[in-house]
Image (tube, helix red, strand yellow):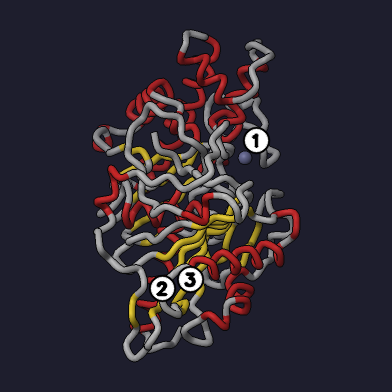
Amino acid sequence: MPGWSRTVSPRCSRSCSRHAAARATPRASGRSRWPRSARGSSRRRPSRSPSSRSRTTSPRASRRSRAPRGSCVADASPGAAAPTVVVGVDLGGTKTAAATVAADGTLGPVLAVPTPAAGGPDAVLDAVAGVVREVVAALPGAARLRALGVGAAGVVDVGRGVIVSATDTLPGWPGTDVAGGLRRRLADLAEVPDLPVFVENDVDAHAAGEVWRGAAAGARSALLVAVGTGVGGAVVLDGHPLRGAHHVAGELGHVPVPGAELLRCPCGRTGHLEAIGAGPAVHRRYLALGGDATSPDTRDVVARADTGDELAASVVRDAARAVGRAVAGVVTVLDPEVVVVGGGMAGAGDLWWSALEEALRAEVVDVLADLPLRPAALGNVAAVVGAARGAWNLLDDRTTDGGAR
Ligand SMILES: [Zn+2]
């Protein structure tokens, strides 16, 4: 089961194989495989799942057909000698990945660097600018940067490209002017002085990627759910991401759900979905209910569930049911065309999926009985693709507005 996963080690260095980066493509669908890593919200970023770090991007040829072959990621601008590119960035708490993305969604080689979170916002933005430079420098010719899209950890004011709030994963991150900081750092690489920089929450970027080129491709509306360390969500309605009046639309993790009444959520309250449905909650609850105290993590609990540990299985089922019930509530209000689920827990296998789906189907009214429920398809590149889509949209808007933006 593909999650919103990452397959590049945050520990990799210049000597590692990331510099022989493969052309990353979406991963195949399936529900039985624990993902190599997990990811998700960073407003409530779901986790890197256990033991899920490999050292290079991991292209899967099986879905490569979604990206048309032969498309060039470096587009020649009218009147410009050098090719120009749009770069998408997935800026996470531990790793930052970037690649060129063509107007048709074709993805170039993905480069990734560790995110120097402890160094503060300036260090983080330096790292982002650095990896963007590497991506562009790897292209033939003296390519220029036409636009930049960033899916960033934290709650983002998309209109300004500024972080509104964030968890402790990125110290000092709230208030950071991501768009302005990157525009300054990359001014010499930009095709135009006022480099278009689009910034949105990384789960929203994932959603945009899945809607553009992934599991929700072609849908006008979708609910994207990421279940990992946290539970994140994003909503696309009528082709547009739903931001909300306070930039937090889609925060599924903090929806009250039955069964979590006595469980403390990372936000400090009790009763929220994340307190029972997120990956760490599964492990925590297994131990609290008398499970084997030597169990090291959620991955282990899921493995035990698969091999007959009834307590482990019940905890996993409870977690999935909670997600299913929360999703049922959201889809009843919003009526999306499709629900896409990713993140580390989405790789927990059929036990998790069947419990989620049963709970969802049991709760929704008849007219929603056949609502498609799909695993996320783009894996570790979804946010890169989706962020770039936002950048392309900025360019379209500038064209439409006669350069007003
Ligand atoms: Zn909460």
In-image side of 89 versus 78 (left or right): right
Task: Using the numbered discs, state the Cα–Cα distance from disc 1 to disc 2 in whole angstroms.
Answer: 49 Å
Q: Identify the residue at horizontal 30%, vertical 33% (top origin).
A: 365
User: Label 2's element?
Assistant: loop
Which mark's residue is nearer the viewer, 1 or 2?
A: 2
Q: Which residue is mark 3?
A: 136
Task: Using the numbered discs, state the Cα–Cα distance from disc 3 to disc 1 in whole angstroms.
Answer: 42 Å
Q: Identify the residue at horizontal 36%, vertical 43% (top origin).
A: 27
Q: Amino acid at mark 3?
A: Val
Report whether the residue tagged 1 is closer than 8 Å to ligand 1. Answer: yes
User: Label 3's element?
Assistant: helix
Q: Which residue is mark 2?
A: 140
List x then y, in percent, for residue 87.
Answer: 45, 67
Picture quadrant of ligand 1: top right
User: Label 1's element?
Assistant: loop
Q: Amino acid at mark 2?
A: Pro
List x then y, in percent, for residue 166.
Answer: 66, 54
Location of the N terminus (image quadrant): top left
Report whether the residue tagged 2 is closer than 8 Å to ligand 1. Answer: no
Tell me, for residue 265, which label it has, or none.
1
Q: Identify the residue at horizontal 28%, vertical 56% (top origin).
A: 67
- Asked if residue 56 shows in the view, the reply is yes
